[in-house]
Image: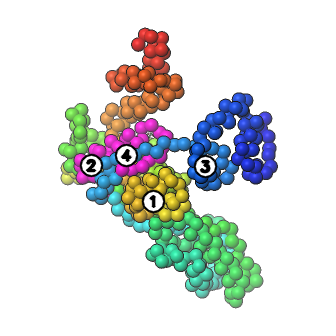
């Protein structure tokens, strides 16, 4: 039975661990040792991680891998990827190498506008509200100056504020719909601070607006928050090459491959069941780079999937076509990313990842992340439409199965060699381990 506890956050780290271990674990020493095993011996570094969140008890590791040979807009990149799924980095590297020999990836940022809202209730005359908004708009911007002046120095700031009437969907519901340019910052704190200031100004100025009746003077602010839906913070990445250059194996006929590939993308465009998996594969690449560079992958996920359903049906983020003997494959997706602020200057591995990427601007990072997504999708569709996904996937997964069975290095080497010429399935690996350990191998 779990126990309730009050004041948990006030306990010291070691008392928190004691409580957890004593409450939930039968082998208390084991549980404690596992938690402690992941502590960093560098106390300052550990403290940094402890202080990222509340109630830290240990660190949760993910591998940080790199995918080299990404030619993006004629510049070579090695892309850092933080991810647990065994085949993702290998697939990215393979796709990078494939396109390196075919002109590389081209990427362009289409727009960089971010959005936020003050959601409020107003039970009165809409024309009066519109006149009030027109009058108060300059003051909304003026009152936010202490927040916006540094961002303005960097070329960003508030782009516009509009009043939106949402009363046909929800009685008395209106919004201030504000747009922002946040340059190299993801901008969440900047945007939320501006919005909270807009809300204060809106509420207080309404009290002084003479046209309003006493009832109309009371604007009820429901909340002020940025939107993670950023359809105007958009990036495009693409690859193309003549169809006859599209195969690097005698087993694959380039024309048949191109046609099958385009069909596979078309299926994801019209069939949501497939689109979700197709886009999941894209997000394997996107999230891994977003995470490695200290960005908010939940924000990116939420925004990307909303974008994928913008036409009323959940659909593919990538598209492909064959035109005049050329194969074209491209992606368009919204990405709100930052290369300054947040974790970017704080987490040593994030700093390292950004240095590895030559200290990109937020726009350059958008391009790199979009390319990682496109490459991942190319690799997945190439496997799916030719050999099937399991061959490569299980080869990469072999190590996980061997580790599950605590194989020694010698055992691993022997079995890796064996499975170069045998199909990897979970049961085949287990059988091989058992045979090897009983001396039959
Ligand atoms: C697995 O993580 C991702 C794939 O399922 C993506 C896809 O099916 O396109 C291989």
Q: Which mark is residue 334?
A: 1
Give yes or no for contact between labels 2 and 4 (Cβ–Cβ under 8 Å): no
Residue sitting at x 36%, y 23%: 417
**Residue at label 3?**
43
Sequence-wise, the earlier of marks 3 and 2 is: 3
Give yes or no for contact between labels 4 and 3 (Cβ–Cβ under 8 Å): no
Give yes or no for contact between labels 1 and 4 (Cβ–Cβ under 8 Å): no
Residue sitting at x 67%, y 76%: 200
**Residue at label 2?**
100
| Mark 4 or mark 3, whichever is nearer to me | 3
Sequence-wise, the earlier of marks 3 and 1 is: 3
How far apart marks 4 and 3 lie (CA) works out to 31 Å
Is 419 inside the magenta-drawn segment? no
Residue situated in front as seen by the camera: 358 or 117:
358
| Mark 3 or mark 1, whichever is nearer to me | 3
Instruction: Indicate the position of residue 392 as horizontal and vertical percent values.
Output: 37, 33
| Mark 1 or mark 4, whichever is nearer to me | 4
What span is colored magenta in the figure?
78-106
Sequence-wise, the earlier of marks 1 and 2 is: 2
Under circle 1, the secondary element is strand
Q: Is residue 257 above or below residue 330?
A: above
How far apart marks 2 and 4 lie (CA) works out to 12 Å
In which quadrant of the rendered view does residue 217 lie? bottom right
Residue furthest to the bottom: 210
**Residue at label 4?**
67
- Side of 173 where 381 appears, left or right: left
- The picture quadrant for ligand 1 comes to top left
In which quadrant of the rendered view does residue 385 lie? top left
Instruction: Indicate the position of residue 180 as horizontal and vertical percent values.
Output: 51, 71
Under circle 3, the secondary element is helix
Q: Residues within 10 Å of mark 1 (few under 14, many from 20)?
A: many
């Amino acid at each position: 039975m779990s126990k309730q506890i009050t004041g948990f956050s006030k306990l010291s780290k070691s008392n928190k661990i004691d409580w957890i271990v004593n409450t939930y674990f039968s082998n208390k020493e084991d549980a404690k040792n596992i938690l402690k095993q992941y502590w960093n011996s560098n106390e300052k570094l550990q403290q940094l991680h402890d202080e990222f969140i509340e109630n830290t008890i240990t660190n949760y590791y993910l591998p940080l891998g790199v995918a080299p040979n990404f030619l993006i807009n004629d510049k070579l990149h090695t892309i850092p990827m933080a991810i647990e799924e065994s085949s993702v980095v290998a697939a990215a590297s393979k796709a990078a190498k494939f396109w390196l020999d075919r002109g590389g990836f081209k990427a362009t940022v289409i727009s960089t506008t971010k959005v936020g809202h003050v959601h409020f209730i107003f039970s009165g005359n809409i024309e009066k509200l519109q006149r009030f908004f027109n009058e108060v708009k300059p003051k909304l911007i003026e009152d936010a100056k202490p927040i916006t002046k540094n961002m303005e120095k960097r070329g960003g700031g508030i782009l516009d504020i509009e009043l939106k009437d949402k009363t046909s969907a929800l009685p008395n519901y209106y919004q201030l719909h504000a747009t922002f340019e946040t340059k190299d910052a993801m901008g969440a704190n900047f945007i939320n601070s501006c919005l909270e200031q807009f809300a204060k100004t809106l509420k207080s100025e309404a009290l002084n607006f003479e046209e309003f009746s006493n009832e109309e003077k009371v604007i009820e602010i429901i909340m002020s928050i940025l939107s993670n839906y950023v359809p105007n913070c958009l990036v495009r990445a693409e690859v193309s090459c003549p169809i006859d250059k599209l195969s690097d194996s005698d087993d694959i006929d380039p024309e048949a491959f191109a046609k099958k590939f385009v069909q596979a993308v078309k299926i994801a465009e019209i069939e949501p069941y497939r689109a979700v998996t197709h886009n999941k594969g894209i997000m394997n690449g996107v999230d891994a780079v977003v995470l490695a560079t200290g960005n908010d992958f939940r924000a990116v996920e939420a925004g990307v999937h909303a974008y994928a359903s913008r036409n009323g049906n959940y659909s593919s983020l990538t598209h492909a076509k064959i035109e005049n003997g050329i194969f074209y494959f491209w992606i368009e997706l919204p990405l709100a990313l930052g290369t300054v602020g947040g974790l970017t200057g704080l987490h040593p591995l994030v700093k390292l990842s950004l240095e590895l990427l030559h200290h990109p601007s937020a726009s350059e990072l958008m391009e790199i992340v979009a390319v990682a997504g496109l490459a991942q999708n190319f690799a997945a569709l190439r496997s799916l439409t030719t050999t099937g996904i399991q061959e490569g996937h299980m080869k990469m997964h072999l190590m996980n199965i061997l580790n599950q069975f605590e194989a020694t290095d010698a055992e691993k080497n022997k079995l890796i060699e064996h499975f170069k010429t045998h199909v990897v399935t979970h049961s085949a690996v287990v059988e091989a381990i058992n045979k090897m350990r009983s001396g039959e191998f």
